[in-house]
Image: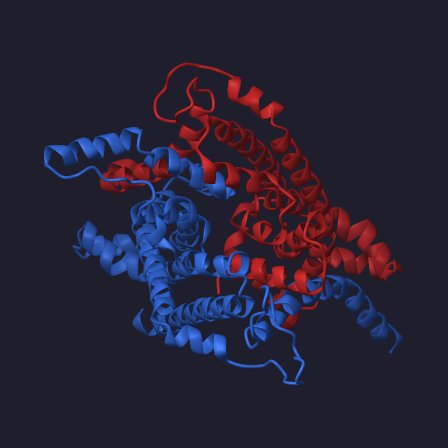
Amino acid sequence: MAALAETTKSRWLVSGPPLLYLIAFFALPALIMVLASFRSPGEFGGLAPLVDTSGQVDLNVESYTRFLTEPVYAQVFLKSVVVALLTTLCCLLLGYPLAMVIARSPKRRRDLLLLLVILPFWSNFLIRVYAWMIILGPQAMLSRAVNSVLAVAGIEPVSLLFSPFAVLVCLVYVHLPFMVLPLYANLEKHDQALLDAAQDLGANGWQRFWKVTFPLSLPGVYAGAALVFIPALGIFAIPDILGGPDDSLIGNLIKQQFLETRDWPFGSVLSIVLTVAALLLAGLVAWIGRARTEKEPARA
Amino acid sequence: MPSVARRFPWLWVAASAGFLFLYLPLVIVVVYSFNDSRLNAEWVGFTLDWYRKLAEDAEMLSAAGNSLIIGIVTSVVSTILGTMAGLAMYRHPSRLLSVLVLTPIAIPEILMGVSLLIFFVLLNFTLGLISVTLAHIAFCIGFVAIVVRSRLAGMDESLTEAARDCGATPAQAFRHVTLPLIMPGVIAGALMAFTLSIDDFVITFFTAGAGTSTLPLQIYSMIKISVTPEVNAISTLLMLLTLALIVIASRLAPGILESSQETTP
């Protein structure tokens, strides 16, 4: 019995401090944000007093009503979802060949190639955004080339920087490693014998890919899609730096509510909508993935 | 087995394009940091002026100092707490702990930034170095915990049990057996936490307040105003630092770089 008491004690000694820290600096702030979403904005920003002079308790759903009734917010939110989906799709198209080449390289070269995919992810986020400011800048080679082609066709010169195009390219650039890693982890486990069997049965390269490799890689595709979609949905720095005034996404709205308008309740509502959307989607992806893997043995 | 390049030529072309896409932007940033021109548009000639300018930029130096202090404190504290969390998650898996440790990594960063902003302001806690450090620790714990847990998974737990059987107290068994065995993972986690802290922009942006700057915040305010090769110079130095730390970390704990994907739902 004494031994058991000691294990429980040492267990709490080990898990207690990180647990307390994360409750204080992660769970509690999140909870406060949920409560803030049901309050009114204060006269000078922040929150209105919880109990006002007439003794009325300040709890309401006005900020939620505002989100649902003013179409401009739903529009920005939908636009963010579309942009995040486009980013996910582009990452998949670009990341799949990369993951496949790495998975099919000789073993000793795989680690190096994988490292090459991951390294840019570990360089500073803002530096990677800044790089695209240079590449897409009006005096850079790319802009001049594009505009001279457009001039031949008689079209007005365009600005590549501060455009939805710049935002999308950079979103894809920043999130690509998140797609390649889970795809690689999946593709690497594929049994070459299945492809050989398909070849013996007369399947050509495309057929082998679409009928064998791709269906088997779907769990990796789903995992990669979730890892790209969730952070892409909440991004604010990329539209802020590379986008024009009309390219704001939900992340920019949130930033604006907290730092400029200082309407905390509404900012909290937007943040909660973003979290719920991200978690719902992650849950959906996990659910599809599980349903598929459970079906797999039946098909084999 | 025939080489990949010969068997799948189109695949190889697509992958090369992918690698080019990943690296060309970073190469351009580095190359233009040595360019003798204000415009990041074409190569004019070699110079170290931008680095000299950087060394004389008082704001940048104070931002670098702040980043360093925040990074070191974050690294030390989050390594201790993260190692504890990793141990606890491995030995006594609990749903509550896993959710608290892994969710901060999985949700969009901006959420943690704004909720901590509300939290600190409501508590009348002055935004500055301390609030940023507290926030950084919160998101680094998870990364350290993942690295330490995977290191534990790769070690022989019976060694700790043997020490206990020989009469060691749990503390002695940890100090003399478990800790030395997981040390490479712990150090790798510390380096990773330092890198994440030095590089963080979003959470810092919301928790730093008006008077405090870090390297990423300084870079942000510079590029919002204009594009100058001084940013290329600081970027190049920061990339070198990160690269060195990550190479060391990955030597100590192979697979550490991929740990971010463990948050897969």
Vertically, is A148 above or below A42? above
Residue most extreme to the bottom: A55
Which image quarter holds the C terminus of chain A?
A: bottom left
The quarter of the picture where residue B141 lies is bottom right
Residue A166, compared with residue B239, is above or below; it is below
Estimate the x, y position of residue A152 in percent, counting from the top left.
11, 32
Q: In this view, does A111 lie above or below B158?
A: above
Figure chain in blue: A
Q: Which of B181 and A279 is in front in this view?
A: A279
Q: Give the residue at x 56% y 29%.
A: B237
**In this rendering, would A265 be left or right of A79?**
right
Drawn colour of chain B? red
Q: Can residue A17 be seen in this view?
A: yes
Res A115 visible: no
Counting from the top left corner in percent of width and height, residue A196 is at 26, 52
Which residue is rendered at x = 64% and y = 35% of the image? B64
